[in-house]
Amino acid sequence: MTSTYNPTIQTKDTVVHRVLLGKKQILVTEEESLLVQLERAGIHIEYQCREGYCSSCSIKLLWGNVSYPFEPLAWVQSGYLLACCAIVKSDIEIAFF
């Protein structure tokens, strides 16, 4: 018996990805920033500007892919993402360090 892992779920118009945070898992879409979707799930992180200027919402990206609809003005350290403007493009795992 063979098992196939599908990293994303696709509904009629929306692609859904899994975000792992420790033992928690939430589902997110590509339609809103990660910050907005984390907040909706009850996961609050530090932020200030919500527009990629300050990097206070920087989160460690352990694996997976995100993109930015516009280039953030804040410096994004390698291996991190800015939750306020990152769009999740695959299943990801994040950590708060």
Image (cartoon, rainbow, N blue to C red):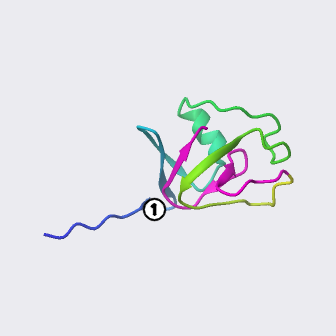
Q: Nearer the viewer, residue 68 or 92?
A: 92
Percent across and percent down for residue 42 are 55, 29
> Does residue 87 lie above or below 48 as drawn?
below
All told, the count of numbered labels is: 1
Residue at 45 percent of width and 39 percent of height: 22
- Report the quarter where the N terminus lies: bottom left
- Report the quarter where the C terminus lies: top right
Q: Nearer the viewer, residue 81 or 10?
A: 81
Residue 31 vs residue 73: left or right?
Answer: left
Q: Does the magenta stretch mainly form a helix, a strand or a loop?
A: loop
Q: Which residue lies most toward the left here?
A: 1
Query: Does the magenta segment cover residue 81?
Result: yes
Residue at 66 percent of width and 52 percent of height: 80
Percent across and percent down for residue 16 are 48, 55
Residue 67 vs residue 92: left or right?
Answer: right
Residue 77 vs residue 53: left or right?
Answer: left
Residue 5 vs residue 73: left or right?
Answer: left
Q: Which residue lies most toward the bottom here?
A: 2
Residue at 86 percent of width and 54 percent of height: 73
Q: Which residue is mark 1?
A: 12
Percent across and percent down for residue 69 are 74, 60
Q: Quadrant of residue 23?
A: top left
Say which amino acid is labelled 1.
Lys
Magenta span: 74-97
- The secondary element bearing badge 1 is classed as loop
Percent across and percent down for residue 90 are 52, 61
Query: Does the magenta segment cover residue 20?
Result: no
Q: Quadrant of residue 70?
A: bottom right
